[in-house]
Image (cartoon, rainbow, N blue to C red):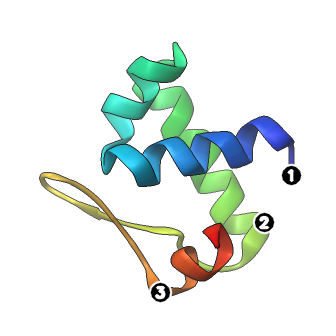
């Protein structure tokens, strides 16, 4: 896992939206979404629950971000 990817997780958590975080990070939404999927596979659990109006951090995700 790369340090910048941890920063991406924090930004998504802070904003509650992958698309808003992507805009702040100067990435496309698709790129950030793919990075998050890879991180979740590497960690072995979902960090975010994707909702129609954004994302919600899972219990495991909150623990990992702490």
Q: What secondary structure is marked by label 1?
A: loop
Position of 27 relative to 20 (above/below): above
Q: Nearer the viewer, residue 45 or 23?
A: 23
Position of 38 relative to 28 (above/below): below
**Residue count near mark 3 (Cα–Cα under 10 Å), binned few <14, some 14–19, many ≥20:** few
Q: Is residue 60 left or right of residue 13?
A: right
Q: Where does label 1 land, which residue?
A: 1
The mark nearer the N terminus, 2 or 3, is 2
Residue drawn at the location 44% of the way across and 21% of the way down: 24
Q: Which mark is residue 42?
A: 2
Q: Look at discs 2 and 3 and give the one toward the viewer.
A: 3
Residue drawn at the location 47% of the way across and 86% of the way down: 59
Position of 35 relative to 24 (above/below): below
The mark nearer the N terminus, 1 or 2, is 1
Counting from the top left corner in percent of width and height, residue 13 is at 44, 54
Residue drawn at the location 31% of the way across and 51% of the way down: 16
Counting from the top left corner in percent of width and height, residue 32 is at 53, 34
**Residue count near mark 1 (Cα–Cα under 10 Å), binned few <14, some 14–19, many ≥20:** few
Position of 50 relative to 4 (above/below): below
Q: What secondary structure is marked by label 2?
A: helix
Counting from the top left corner in percent of width and height, residue 17 is at 31, 44
Q: Which mark is residue 59?
A: 3
**Residue count near mark 2 (Cα–Cα under 10 Å), binned few <14, some 14–19, many ≥20:** few
| Residue furthest out toward the left | 53
Q: CA distance from mark 1 to mark 3?
A: 20 Å
């Amino acid at each position: 896992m790369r340090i910048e990817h941890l920063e991406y997780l924090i930004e998504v958590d802070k904003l509650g939206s992958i698309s808003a975080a992507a805009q702040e990070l100067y990435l496309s939404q698709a790129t950030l979404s793919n990075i998050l999927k890879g991180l979740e596979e590497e960690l072995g659990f979902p960090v975010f629950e994707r909702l129609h109006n954004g994302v919600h951090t899972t219990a495991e995700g909150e623990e990992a971000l702490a």
